[in-house]
Amino acid sequence: MKFGRTILIVISLWIAVITVLHGALNLRWFDKKAEVGTTKTFGVGFLPVTCHLTCPVTHFINKEMEGRDMFQPMRFSGWPELKEMFIGRSKDMPASFILAPMAIALREQGVKIKIVHLGHRDGSAVVVHKDSGIFQTADLRGKTIAVPGRYANQRLIIFRELKKVGMNFDDVKIVEMPPPDMPAALQSRAVDAITSGEPFMGQAELDGYGRTLWQAKDVWPGFISCVLAVHEDAIRDHRAEIQRLVNGIAASGKWIDQSMAHRMDAAQFVAANYYNQNPRLLSYVLAKPPDRVTYSRLKPLRAEFEEIERLGKEAGILQGTAHFEDYVDDTFAPDPMVVQAPHFEVKK
């Protein structure tokens, strides 16, 4: 009897193991990239900044309306980790929100990616300590300015504004710093000015020690910091999925800009479910002023990227060997005039 029970247990365990293996290997039960219906989900990289807001907003709205994932948002705390994942694990994360100059530089280095859409417009500022004597660009002479990294477009906006007053990078000290560390550095006077994507500039204002020197929207209208980039093999092999992603990003951008109520709803569900931030901060930067960062005109335009190329080469961060047709595929981006926001309201 004991022998028979043992045989029965062994057979039952064997069947269970075979079933699990079949589900894992053939039906892909445990694979986050498994096909759901007819749409394959895949990773999309993002940072908890307003430049990347359409990533979580698209994911949230799609899940609420359709009950399934269009893609898997993958949150990173900084650019180095996101960049390494995007370059080295393209099968897991074939698409990512990334700095525009960084995308161009990667293409110059031979990484086969294409920009397919913008992440936002504007949404950056230069902030100084409220008690400083810095009231215009010329007052930055000899000062220390924190930027997010070598390939941040905030470095280019500083370069562009210095040129206007006959200055260059030799007249200031540029230091690279993770944006989340910038407000504390400004408060302690470790640096004289900070610039990055929101909400970190807004944090310095909201906490009372920061004063905006100028907003990107006021000195470089339509400013582009981040873009949605995709590996070329994903474009080749999964064009329909990439198109659906771009359509979702474009539509959610229109939804965000449709009303202040949508902006405040986005601040709440993104802060709670994706950014791990106090919603008070996102609410502030999405409202004060309302055009601080916008999400409606997101088709890549040649003239704008050619300006980034030119400034990047002058500033010494780009080689000038990659051009618009090399690093942009604008066939995915719909005409902003025909994009429709989803009919979606957050359940209260």
Image: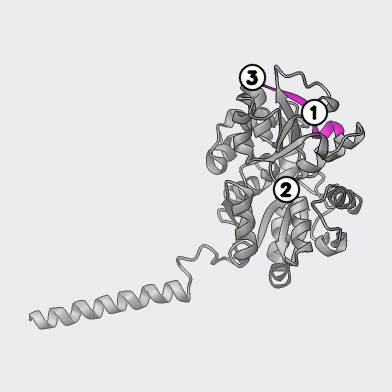
Q: Position of residue 307 (x, y in %)?
A: 89, 48
Q: Secondary structure at mark 3?
A: loop
Kindly identify the amino acid type of the residue bearing the numbered disc 1.
Leu
Q: Earlier in the sequence, mark 1 or mark 2?
A: 1
Q: Secondary structure at mark 1?
A: helix
Q: Earlier in the sequence, mark 1 or mark 3?
A: 1
Measure how far apart labels 3 and 2 are at the Cα level. 29 Å
Kindly identify the amino acid type of the residue bearing the numbered disc 3.
Gly
Identity of the residue drawn at 72% across and 58% down: 229
Measure how far apart labels 1 and 2 are at the Cα level. 19 Å
Q: Position of residue 178 (x, y in %)?
A: 62, 41
Instruction: Tell which residue pokes out farthest to the top in this image.
Output: 131
Q: Which residue is mark 2?
A: 150
- Name the residue nearer the viewer: 129 or 172: 172
Measure how far apart labels 1 and 3 are at the Cα level. 21 Å
Number of other residues with Cα within 10 Å of mark 2, as a class: few under 14, some 14 to 19, many 20 or more:
some
- Name the residue nearer the viewer: 347 or 73: 73
Occupied quadrant, residue 234: bottom right
Q: Which residue is mark 3?
A: 208
Q: Position of residue 338 (x, y in %)?
A: 84, 49
Vertical side of 250 occupied by 288: above or below: above
Residue 121 seen in the figure: no
Q: Earlier in the sequence, mark 3 or mark 2?
A: 2
Q: Which residue is mark 1?
A: 140
Q: Secondary structure at mark 2?
A: loop
Give the magenta part as a residue range. 209-219
Q: Does the magenta segment cover residue 210?
A: yes
- Name the residue nearer the viewer: 165 or 253: 165
Number of other residues with Cα within 10 Å of mark 1, as a class: few under 14, some 14 to 19, many 20 or more:
many
- In the image, which is nearer the foreground, mark 3 or mark 2? 2
**Quadrant showing the C terminus:** top right
